[in-house]
């Protein structure tokens, strides 16, 4: 069973295939503007449907096997392989995009589709990689994030979000009653600003000037400029806009997921002003089998925040963690409609708070 699940993580590579599938459908039907939206139909309609059909996976790796499984090259190799796939996907997608006579509906559909694909490939996998100690994994994570113009996430997520999660100080933790539409722009701005601030503080503590080669934000900015120049040289102004806008949609998608992962959850403030230790009770958990394979078990987010360096293959499900009523794909759609979101999720927040206080 574990071998089958290990192979199941290959499902992430089905995600970028939705783009050439959309192009093929466009050529077959002549409905290019409509088919530009096909990847979104696949990810937000078909995936939730199969999630509910296939059901849950709450089985955890036996503790005695965790270390051996975590160290298997297969799991590391899959995440590293995502980088060339993401770059290749962007280049192919840009080439198709600039050569298609799409109207505004088709343009928005394709950019949003690529943004969601990039969010799953680049940001989700980068999130796994930047938590690891190996330099190669951290570097691949940074490059993936730069491919969606959101490289500050590498710094803010590790030094900001994981420190302040589920507190008012965290830009990535949505307050109870807050709408995703007010949370998203706030998170995009605050997280980008915090990344520069945190890096400036690190350099200051090391007695180095802000304009220094060790300023990580400057280095990623330079790489981002190189990406921009490359897409402009290869595909012109339309190609440059494609690169920038798909990154914007990917970053927005990330913040929707951040909204889902921590909405309404709070860490208690202690008498000394500090907050209680982060545990699996401070992140929403989802154990739907298919979407967890597609997302390298990101939905076992409760265990990730309790133990951030655990590799995705051995992340655990906790029954007493707050549970989402669906996978991230279904919750993403639900979050876009605040009245429905609050009607379904708010009672779960209150029930979790009562359970914790009991």
Image (cartoon, rainbow, N blue to C red):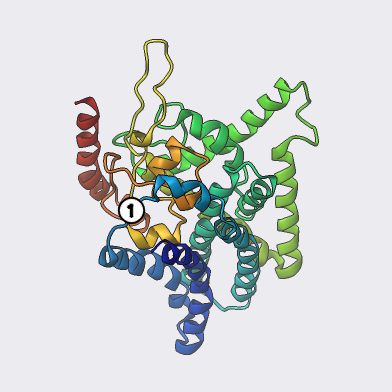
- Determine which quarter of the picture holds residue 239: bottom right
Q: Position of residue 305 (x, y in %)?
A: 44, 38
Relative to 302, does residue 30 appear above or below in the rendering?
A: below
- Determine which quarter of the picture holds residue 20: bottom right
Q: Position of residue 169 (x, y in %)?
A: 46, 26
| Left or right: where 209 falls relative to 272 | right
The quarter of the image holding the C terminus is top left
Question: Label 1, on which residue?
Answer: 59
Q: Position of residue 67 (x, y in %)?
A: 51, 46
The quarter of the image holding the N terminus is bottom left
Would you say residue 187 is visible in this rendering?
yes
Task: Tell me the residue at 45%/64% (across/down).
Answer: 3
Relative to 27, does residue 146 appear above or below in the rendering?
A: above
Task: Tell me the residue at 46%/31% (across/down).
Answer: 170
The residue sitting at the top extreme is: 272
| Left or right: where 269 falls relative to 353 | right
The residue sitting at the bottom extreme is: 28
| Left or right: where 127 falls relative to 339 | right
Q: Position of residue 290 (x, y in %)?
A: 37, 63
Closer to the camera in the image, 88 or 343: 88
Indicate the secondary structure of the residue bearing disc 1: loop
Relative to 43, does residue 215 appear above or below in the rendering?
A: above
């Amino acid at each position: 069973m574990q071998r089958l699940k290990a192979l199941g993580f290959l499902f992430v590579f089905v995600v970028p295939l939705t783009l050439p599938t959309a192009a093929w459908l466009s050529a077959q039907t002549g409905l290019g503007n409509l088919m530009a939206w096909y990847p979104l139909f696949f990810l937000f309609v078909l995936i939730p449907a199969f999630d509910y059909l296939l059901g849950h996976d709450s089985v955890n790796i036996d503790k005695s096997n965790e270390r051996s499984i975590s160290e298997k090259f297969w799991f590391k190799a899959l995440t590293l392989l995502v980088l060339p796939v993401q770059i290749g996907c962007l280049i192919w997608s840009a080439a198709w995009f600039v050569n298609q006579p799409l109207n505004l509906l088709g343009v928005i559909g394709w950019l949003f589709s690529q943004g969601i694909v990039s969010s799953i490939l680049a940001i989700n996998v980068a999130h796994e990689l930047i938590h690891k100690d190996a330099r190669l994994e951290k570097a691949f994570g940074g490059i993936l994030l730069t491919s969606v113009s959101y490289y500050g996430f590498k710094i803010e997520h590790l030094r900001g979000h994981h420190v302040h999660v589920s507190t008012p100080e965290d830009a990535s933790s949505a307050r109870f009653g807050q709408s995703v539409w007010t949370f998203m722009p706030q998170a995009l701005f605050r997280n980008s600003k915090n990344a520069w601030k945190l890096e400036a503080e690190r350099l200051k503590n090391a007695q180095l000037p802000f304009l220094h080669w060790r300023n990580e934000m400057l280095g990623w900015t330079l790489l981002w400029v190189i990406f921009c120049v490359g897409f402009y040289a290869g595909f012109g102004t339309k190609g440059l806009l494609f690169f920038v806008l798909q990154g914007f949609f990917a970053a927005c998608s990330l913040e929707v997921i951040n909204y889902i992962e921590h909405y309404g959850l709070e860490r208690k403030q202690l008498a000394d002003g500090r907050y209680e230790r982060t545990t699996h009770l401070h992140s929403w958990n989802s154990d739907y089998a298919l979407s967890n394979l597609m997302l390298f078990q990101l939905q076992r987010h409760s265990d990730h925040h309790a133990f951030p360096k655990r590799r995705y293959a051995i992340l655990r499900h906790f029954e007493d963690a707050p549970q989402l009523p669906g996978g991230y794909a279904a919750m993403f759609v639900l979050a876009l409609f605040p009245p429905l979101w609050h009607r379904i999720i708010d009672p779960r927040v209150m029930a979790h708070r009562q359970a914790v206080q009991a």
